Amino acid sequence: MLMTITSTSPPATDLGFLLHKNPAAVRSVDVGFGVAHAFYPAAEAERCTIALLVEVDPVALVRRSRGGPFPLAAYVNDRPYAASSFLSVALRKMFGSALRGQCKERPGLPEEKLELSARLPVLPCRGGEELLRKLFEPLGYEVSARAIPLDPWFPSGGTARTSTWLSRRAAGSVTCSASCMSCCRYWTTTSTTG
């Protein structure tokens, strides 16, 4: 699973202070179902991007599962790849201080509205783009999403019955904690409405 947050508010590298992560270092944290890594693919004064990569351990998931409708059901799933509540857990564990709006080095920084964009390349969404808009646009985001076919080589294969697969990008002038919390809010809402 992958999520990126990009700041274009100068100096964009303040994102490192907000998230308490040094742009020159990779941070890894055990999240129980795998490992979460935070790193900066780009860290310049005009544009700074942090990536949260969650490596889900599929063997650990199978050991905790109760099987499924067919013998290999526990092994055949999207959980290691598509953004899910696992990403929400990783966000909370990796960026807990940012979610609480704390920044020791620059106490006023968490309250500043920044030009941030969050991108999730693969996002299951039972409510489709309409649900994404209902959740994120009231928070000040501009949402763009596109449906992802199940198999681009065989478009006649249709779409998933339970979810719409979207690539999501949300951008707006928001606080960093609001950006992280909106993603956590998404999984809380979709897990109870799906």
Image (cartoon, grey):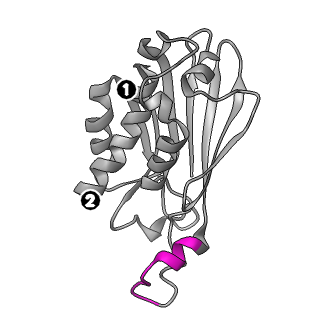
Q: Nearer the viewer, residue 149 or 154?
A: 149
Decide: is 119 above or below 83: above
Q: Position of residue 101 (x, y in %)?
A: 43, 23
Per the rendering, the mark at residue 194 is: 2
- Is residue 11 found left or right of 115 in the rendered image? right
Residue 3 sits in which quadrant?
Answer: top right
Query: Secondary structure under badge 2?
Result: loop
Residue at the spot x=69%, y=32% of the render?
40
Residue 26 sits in which quadrant?
Answer: top right
- Is residue 93 found left or right of 113 in the rendered image? right
Q: Label 1: which residue?
A: 141
**How far apart are the alpha carbons under marks 2 and 1?**
23 Å
Q: Residue furthest left?
A: 193
Amino acid at the residue labelled 2: Gly
The quarter of the picture where the C terminus appears is: bottom left
Q: Position of residue 66 (x, y in %)?
A: 42, 82
Q: Residue furthest right?
A: 24
Decide: is 60 above or below 96: below
Q: Nearer the viewer, residue 166 or 84?
A: 84
Q: Position of residue 45 (x, y in %)?
A: 68, 12
Per the rendering, the mark at residue 123 is: none
Residue at the spot x=46%, y=24% of the render?
176
Residue at the spot x=62%, y=10% of the render?
11
Q: Position of residue 147 (x, y in %)?
A: 43, 50
Q: Reading the chain from its start, which is encountered first: label 2 or label 1?
A: 1
> Within 10 Å of the Cα at label 1, are there few (<14), some (14-19), or many (20+) other Cα atoms?
many
Amino acid at the residue labelled 1: Tyr
Verify whether residue 1 appears in magenta.
Answer: no
Residue 30 sits in which quadrant?
Answer: bottom right
Specify start and end residues of the magenta stretch as a single range.
60-70
> Within 10 Å of the Cα at label 2, are there few (<14), some (14-19), or many (20+) other Cα atoms?
few
